[in-house]
Amino acid sequence: MDENTLPVAGAQVSIKYPDGESSVLFTEATGTFVLGGLAAGEYELRIEKIGFFVLEAQKVSLSADSAEFTFSLTHQDEIHETVNVTASPHVLDPQQVPQTSTLTNAELRDIPVPSTHDLQQSLIALPEILRDNSGLVHIAGSRNTQAQYLLDGVEIGDPISNGLSLNLNVDAVRTAEVHTGRFGAEYAHPGAAILNFDTPEGDDRWRYTITDFLPGINVQDGLQLGNYYPRVYFSGPIIKDNLWFSQTFTLQHTLAFVSGLPSGENTSRDWTGESLSHLLWRVTDNDSLHVALLYNNISDTSLGLDLLHPQSTTTDISSNRVFGYVKNQLSLENKLVETGFSVDRSYAASTPQGDAPYILMVNGAAGNYFQTLQQQGHRYQLFADVIRTSLHWHGTHTLSAGGNVSEVEFIQGAERGEIRALRSDLTLDRLTTFTGSGDFRVSSALAGGFLKDTWNPDRYLIVEAGIRTDWDRYVHSAMAEPRISGNVLPFRDGRGKLSIGWGLYNIPLNLSVIGQTYDQQEVDTLYDPTGTVPVAGPATTHFSQPTSGLQQQYFSITSAGWQQRIGANTLVSIELLARDEHHGLVFEPQTPGQIGGIFLLQTSRRDKYRGATFSARHTFTKGAVLFGSYSRSRASSDQLLDPLLGSLYFVAQQGGPLLWDAPNRLLTWGSVPTPVWGILFSYLFEYRTGYPFNIIDQQQFLIGAPSSHRFPDYANLTIGLEKKFRFRGYLFAARIAAINVLGRENPDTVVNNIDAVNTTPSFLTFSGGQGRAFTARVRFLGRK
């Protein structure tokens, strides 16, 4: 059990016998482990799991009437007083079939990244996760909208697009866990990968931290409030032993300056607020109720400001999102029953700075942005599952079954103005206007169910087989998704594990893509070199759906991995992954090579990912960690182009690398307590191949093959030094971090318009990126 007497699955139990022999086993989903046929005497147990402190030297005396014992693990949260505890290393778990990488709260907190308040930045410490030049997260080469995102096992992907758009307090995440292969049938429409955030619910001990409570002051353009990222976490008992709560608050104020722009027009400002509330009620000894409520609010001014896009071309964003769930978990001997309900509602509004025409220059923009947008989305979901452990037939079986039902909806209201594309001599090259209504509503309902059996014929083999089916009302069809995987342990001491698996994995249709077929139409006119005489058009472009309907999108994933424990605290692994998309949503132009026509929505795209990752992790005494990985991969598609109103590609679909493809990536990080004043040294180093980009001309025609050019290779080293100290009976921690120590440019913006050859900045000029900088962080940890 954990400190709230909830079952802990997957804990490693090492047992030392009175005669000196030993054995290792793992707890099941109900938290139980069974070992029979033992002689009377004294046994010693060691129990450990990632995210918990190790339970060591547990003496158990067995007599003739001994039957059952209970052990309690404590989550590895911030410890304020001095106690002798040991952090759990990443153990080799023979029961764990999915390909899994995990970051604990301590690692999320201690690994230095440029913005420690941004959870998504910390996720790059996982070798499977990259962030593209716009900040979107990609797991094992997948699109941001192709993975399943979970909060405590409940779906939190954007109701409209399925993407990751929620903000979470870094201190509110116990573990961030990613699966890229061999995940079981219990996951509804996981698509290409799974990312789950596990959050704390409180216990009988009061805990509280405050981080970055001192505001920054900026004097670049007069004295004003600078970057300010306070976040608060506190938890404790409402009724001891029965009712607990946890609460986090986050406030983020980001003030960004763009050098080279006039004073007063060189600043963008972002306010973000986040609140996560948890309630845990132990109704009875074997029945618990879990409640969570997450609220996000964002107010962003001058979004998109950079040297090529002055303030007049930016937009102001206002958005909010409310997510909540209620879950009941009931443990009955060898059964675990879970039922729940979740609600997710979002609203976003984007407003330009005025209603003047939007001017596209060959090397930037002027005027006011062309689009005013309001979008609403919601998801309502019911889910239930049951797990039955310790069934015996030619070995041990764990059976599970369950189902889910959800309803999703997307509502939009849009108004679009005029776009004028000018040549380098400022003559009119293309005029774009819009017609029709931008208001629409699109919805769908989803339902699914599964059966799964985890079979242990002996201690050296585990087979996990399952089948699920998912139905989508929008496409009026259901599909079967078989999944099979397993582990082979070739050595008696359990130090090595071979894992293989294959499966089909459904993903819901992206409503933001489908919504384009209900949106406005674009009207384009091309002009002669004088900019006064039309030479083509006006031609109307609209997005359309096929009369024969769409098919359900899914992935076939094959993976294999080897894990090897070296010594007590070193774990090395190699993972191979092959993933293919089937029936991906894509718009195919019906008249490529000319403006106007129909972009027909098809389910014909195939994204592919091939990757091999080697990693090694060593856990030192007192929790020091050293991690390193190298990935060789390719993320590609047979249809790369994603047209949007105002940004159309008048060419046929073509294949090539995806815009976040990074064939080579080297990643290493670690944190080590030093003997100098007890300072904690931490670092993060990342090297990867530069991302691809497209070349276009001013008439929005693609020049050459898509993704034919790349940014320079990326390399970044960040170093942090943190010191804990006591002041008037309270404990604090102060950290100074040096960002981009190497001083690499690492650009994220490029002038990709070939017509900008004779302008300044000119064609293929790179800019942006994080320069060398220093940041400071102070955490209040409570009483010593």
Image (cartoon, rainbow, N blue to C red):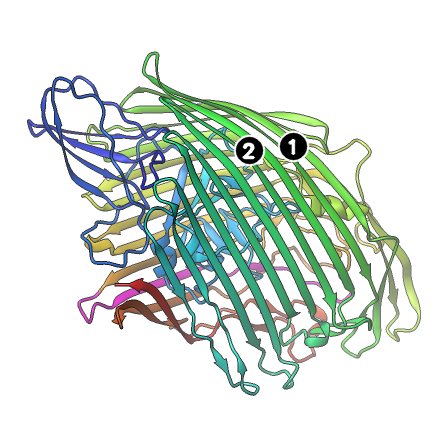
Above or below 748: residue 181:
above
Question: As drawn, which residue projects farthest toward the front?
Answer: 239
Q: Quadrant of residue 736?
A: bottom left
694 magenta-colored: yes
Of residues 288 and 263, the one nearer the viewer is 288
Q: Quadrant of the C terminus?
A: bottom left
Disc 1: which residue: 446
Give the x, y percent position of residue 290. Answer: 47, 39
Relative side of 6 to 216, left or right: left
Give the x, y percent position of residue 148. Answer: 54, 42
Disc 2: which residue: 188
Of residues 781 and 413, the one nearer the viewer is 781
| Range shown magenta | 674-699
Q: Quadrant of residue 381?
A: top right
Number of disc labels: 2
The answer to whether any part of residue 502 appears in the image is yes
Give the x, y percent position of residue 377. Answer: 68, 47
Classify 10 Å Cα crowding around label 1: few (below 14), some (14-19), many (20 and above).
some
At a point 49% along the width and 81% down the height, the residue shown is 217
Question: As drawn, which residue projects farthest toward the left?
Answer: 19
Q: Are marks 1 and 2 in contact (CB under 8 Å)?
A: yes
Earlier along the polypeptide chain: callout 1 or callout 2?
2
Of residues 433 and 437, the one nearer the viewer is 437
Of residues 463 and 213, the one nearer the viewer is 213
Relative side of 25 to 748, left or right: left
Relative side of 356 to 444, left or right: right
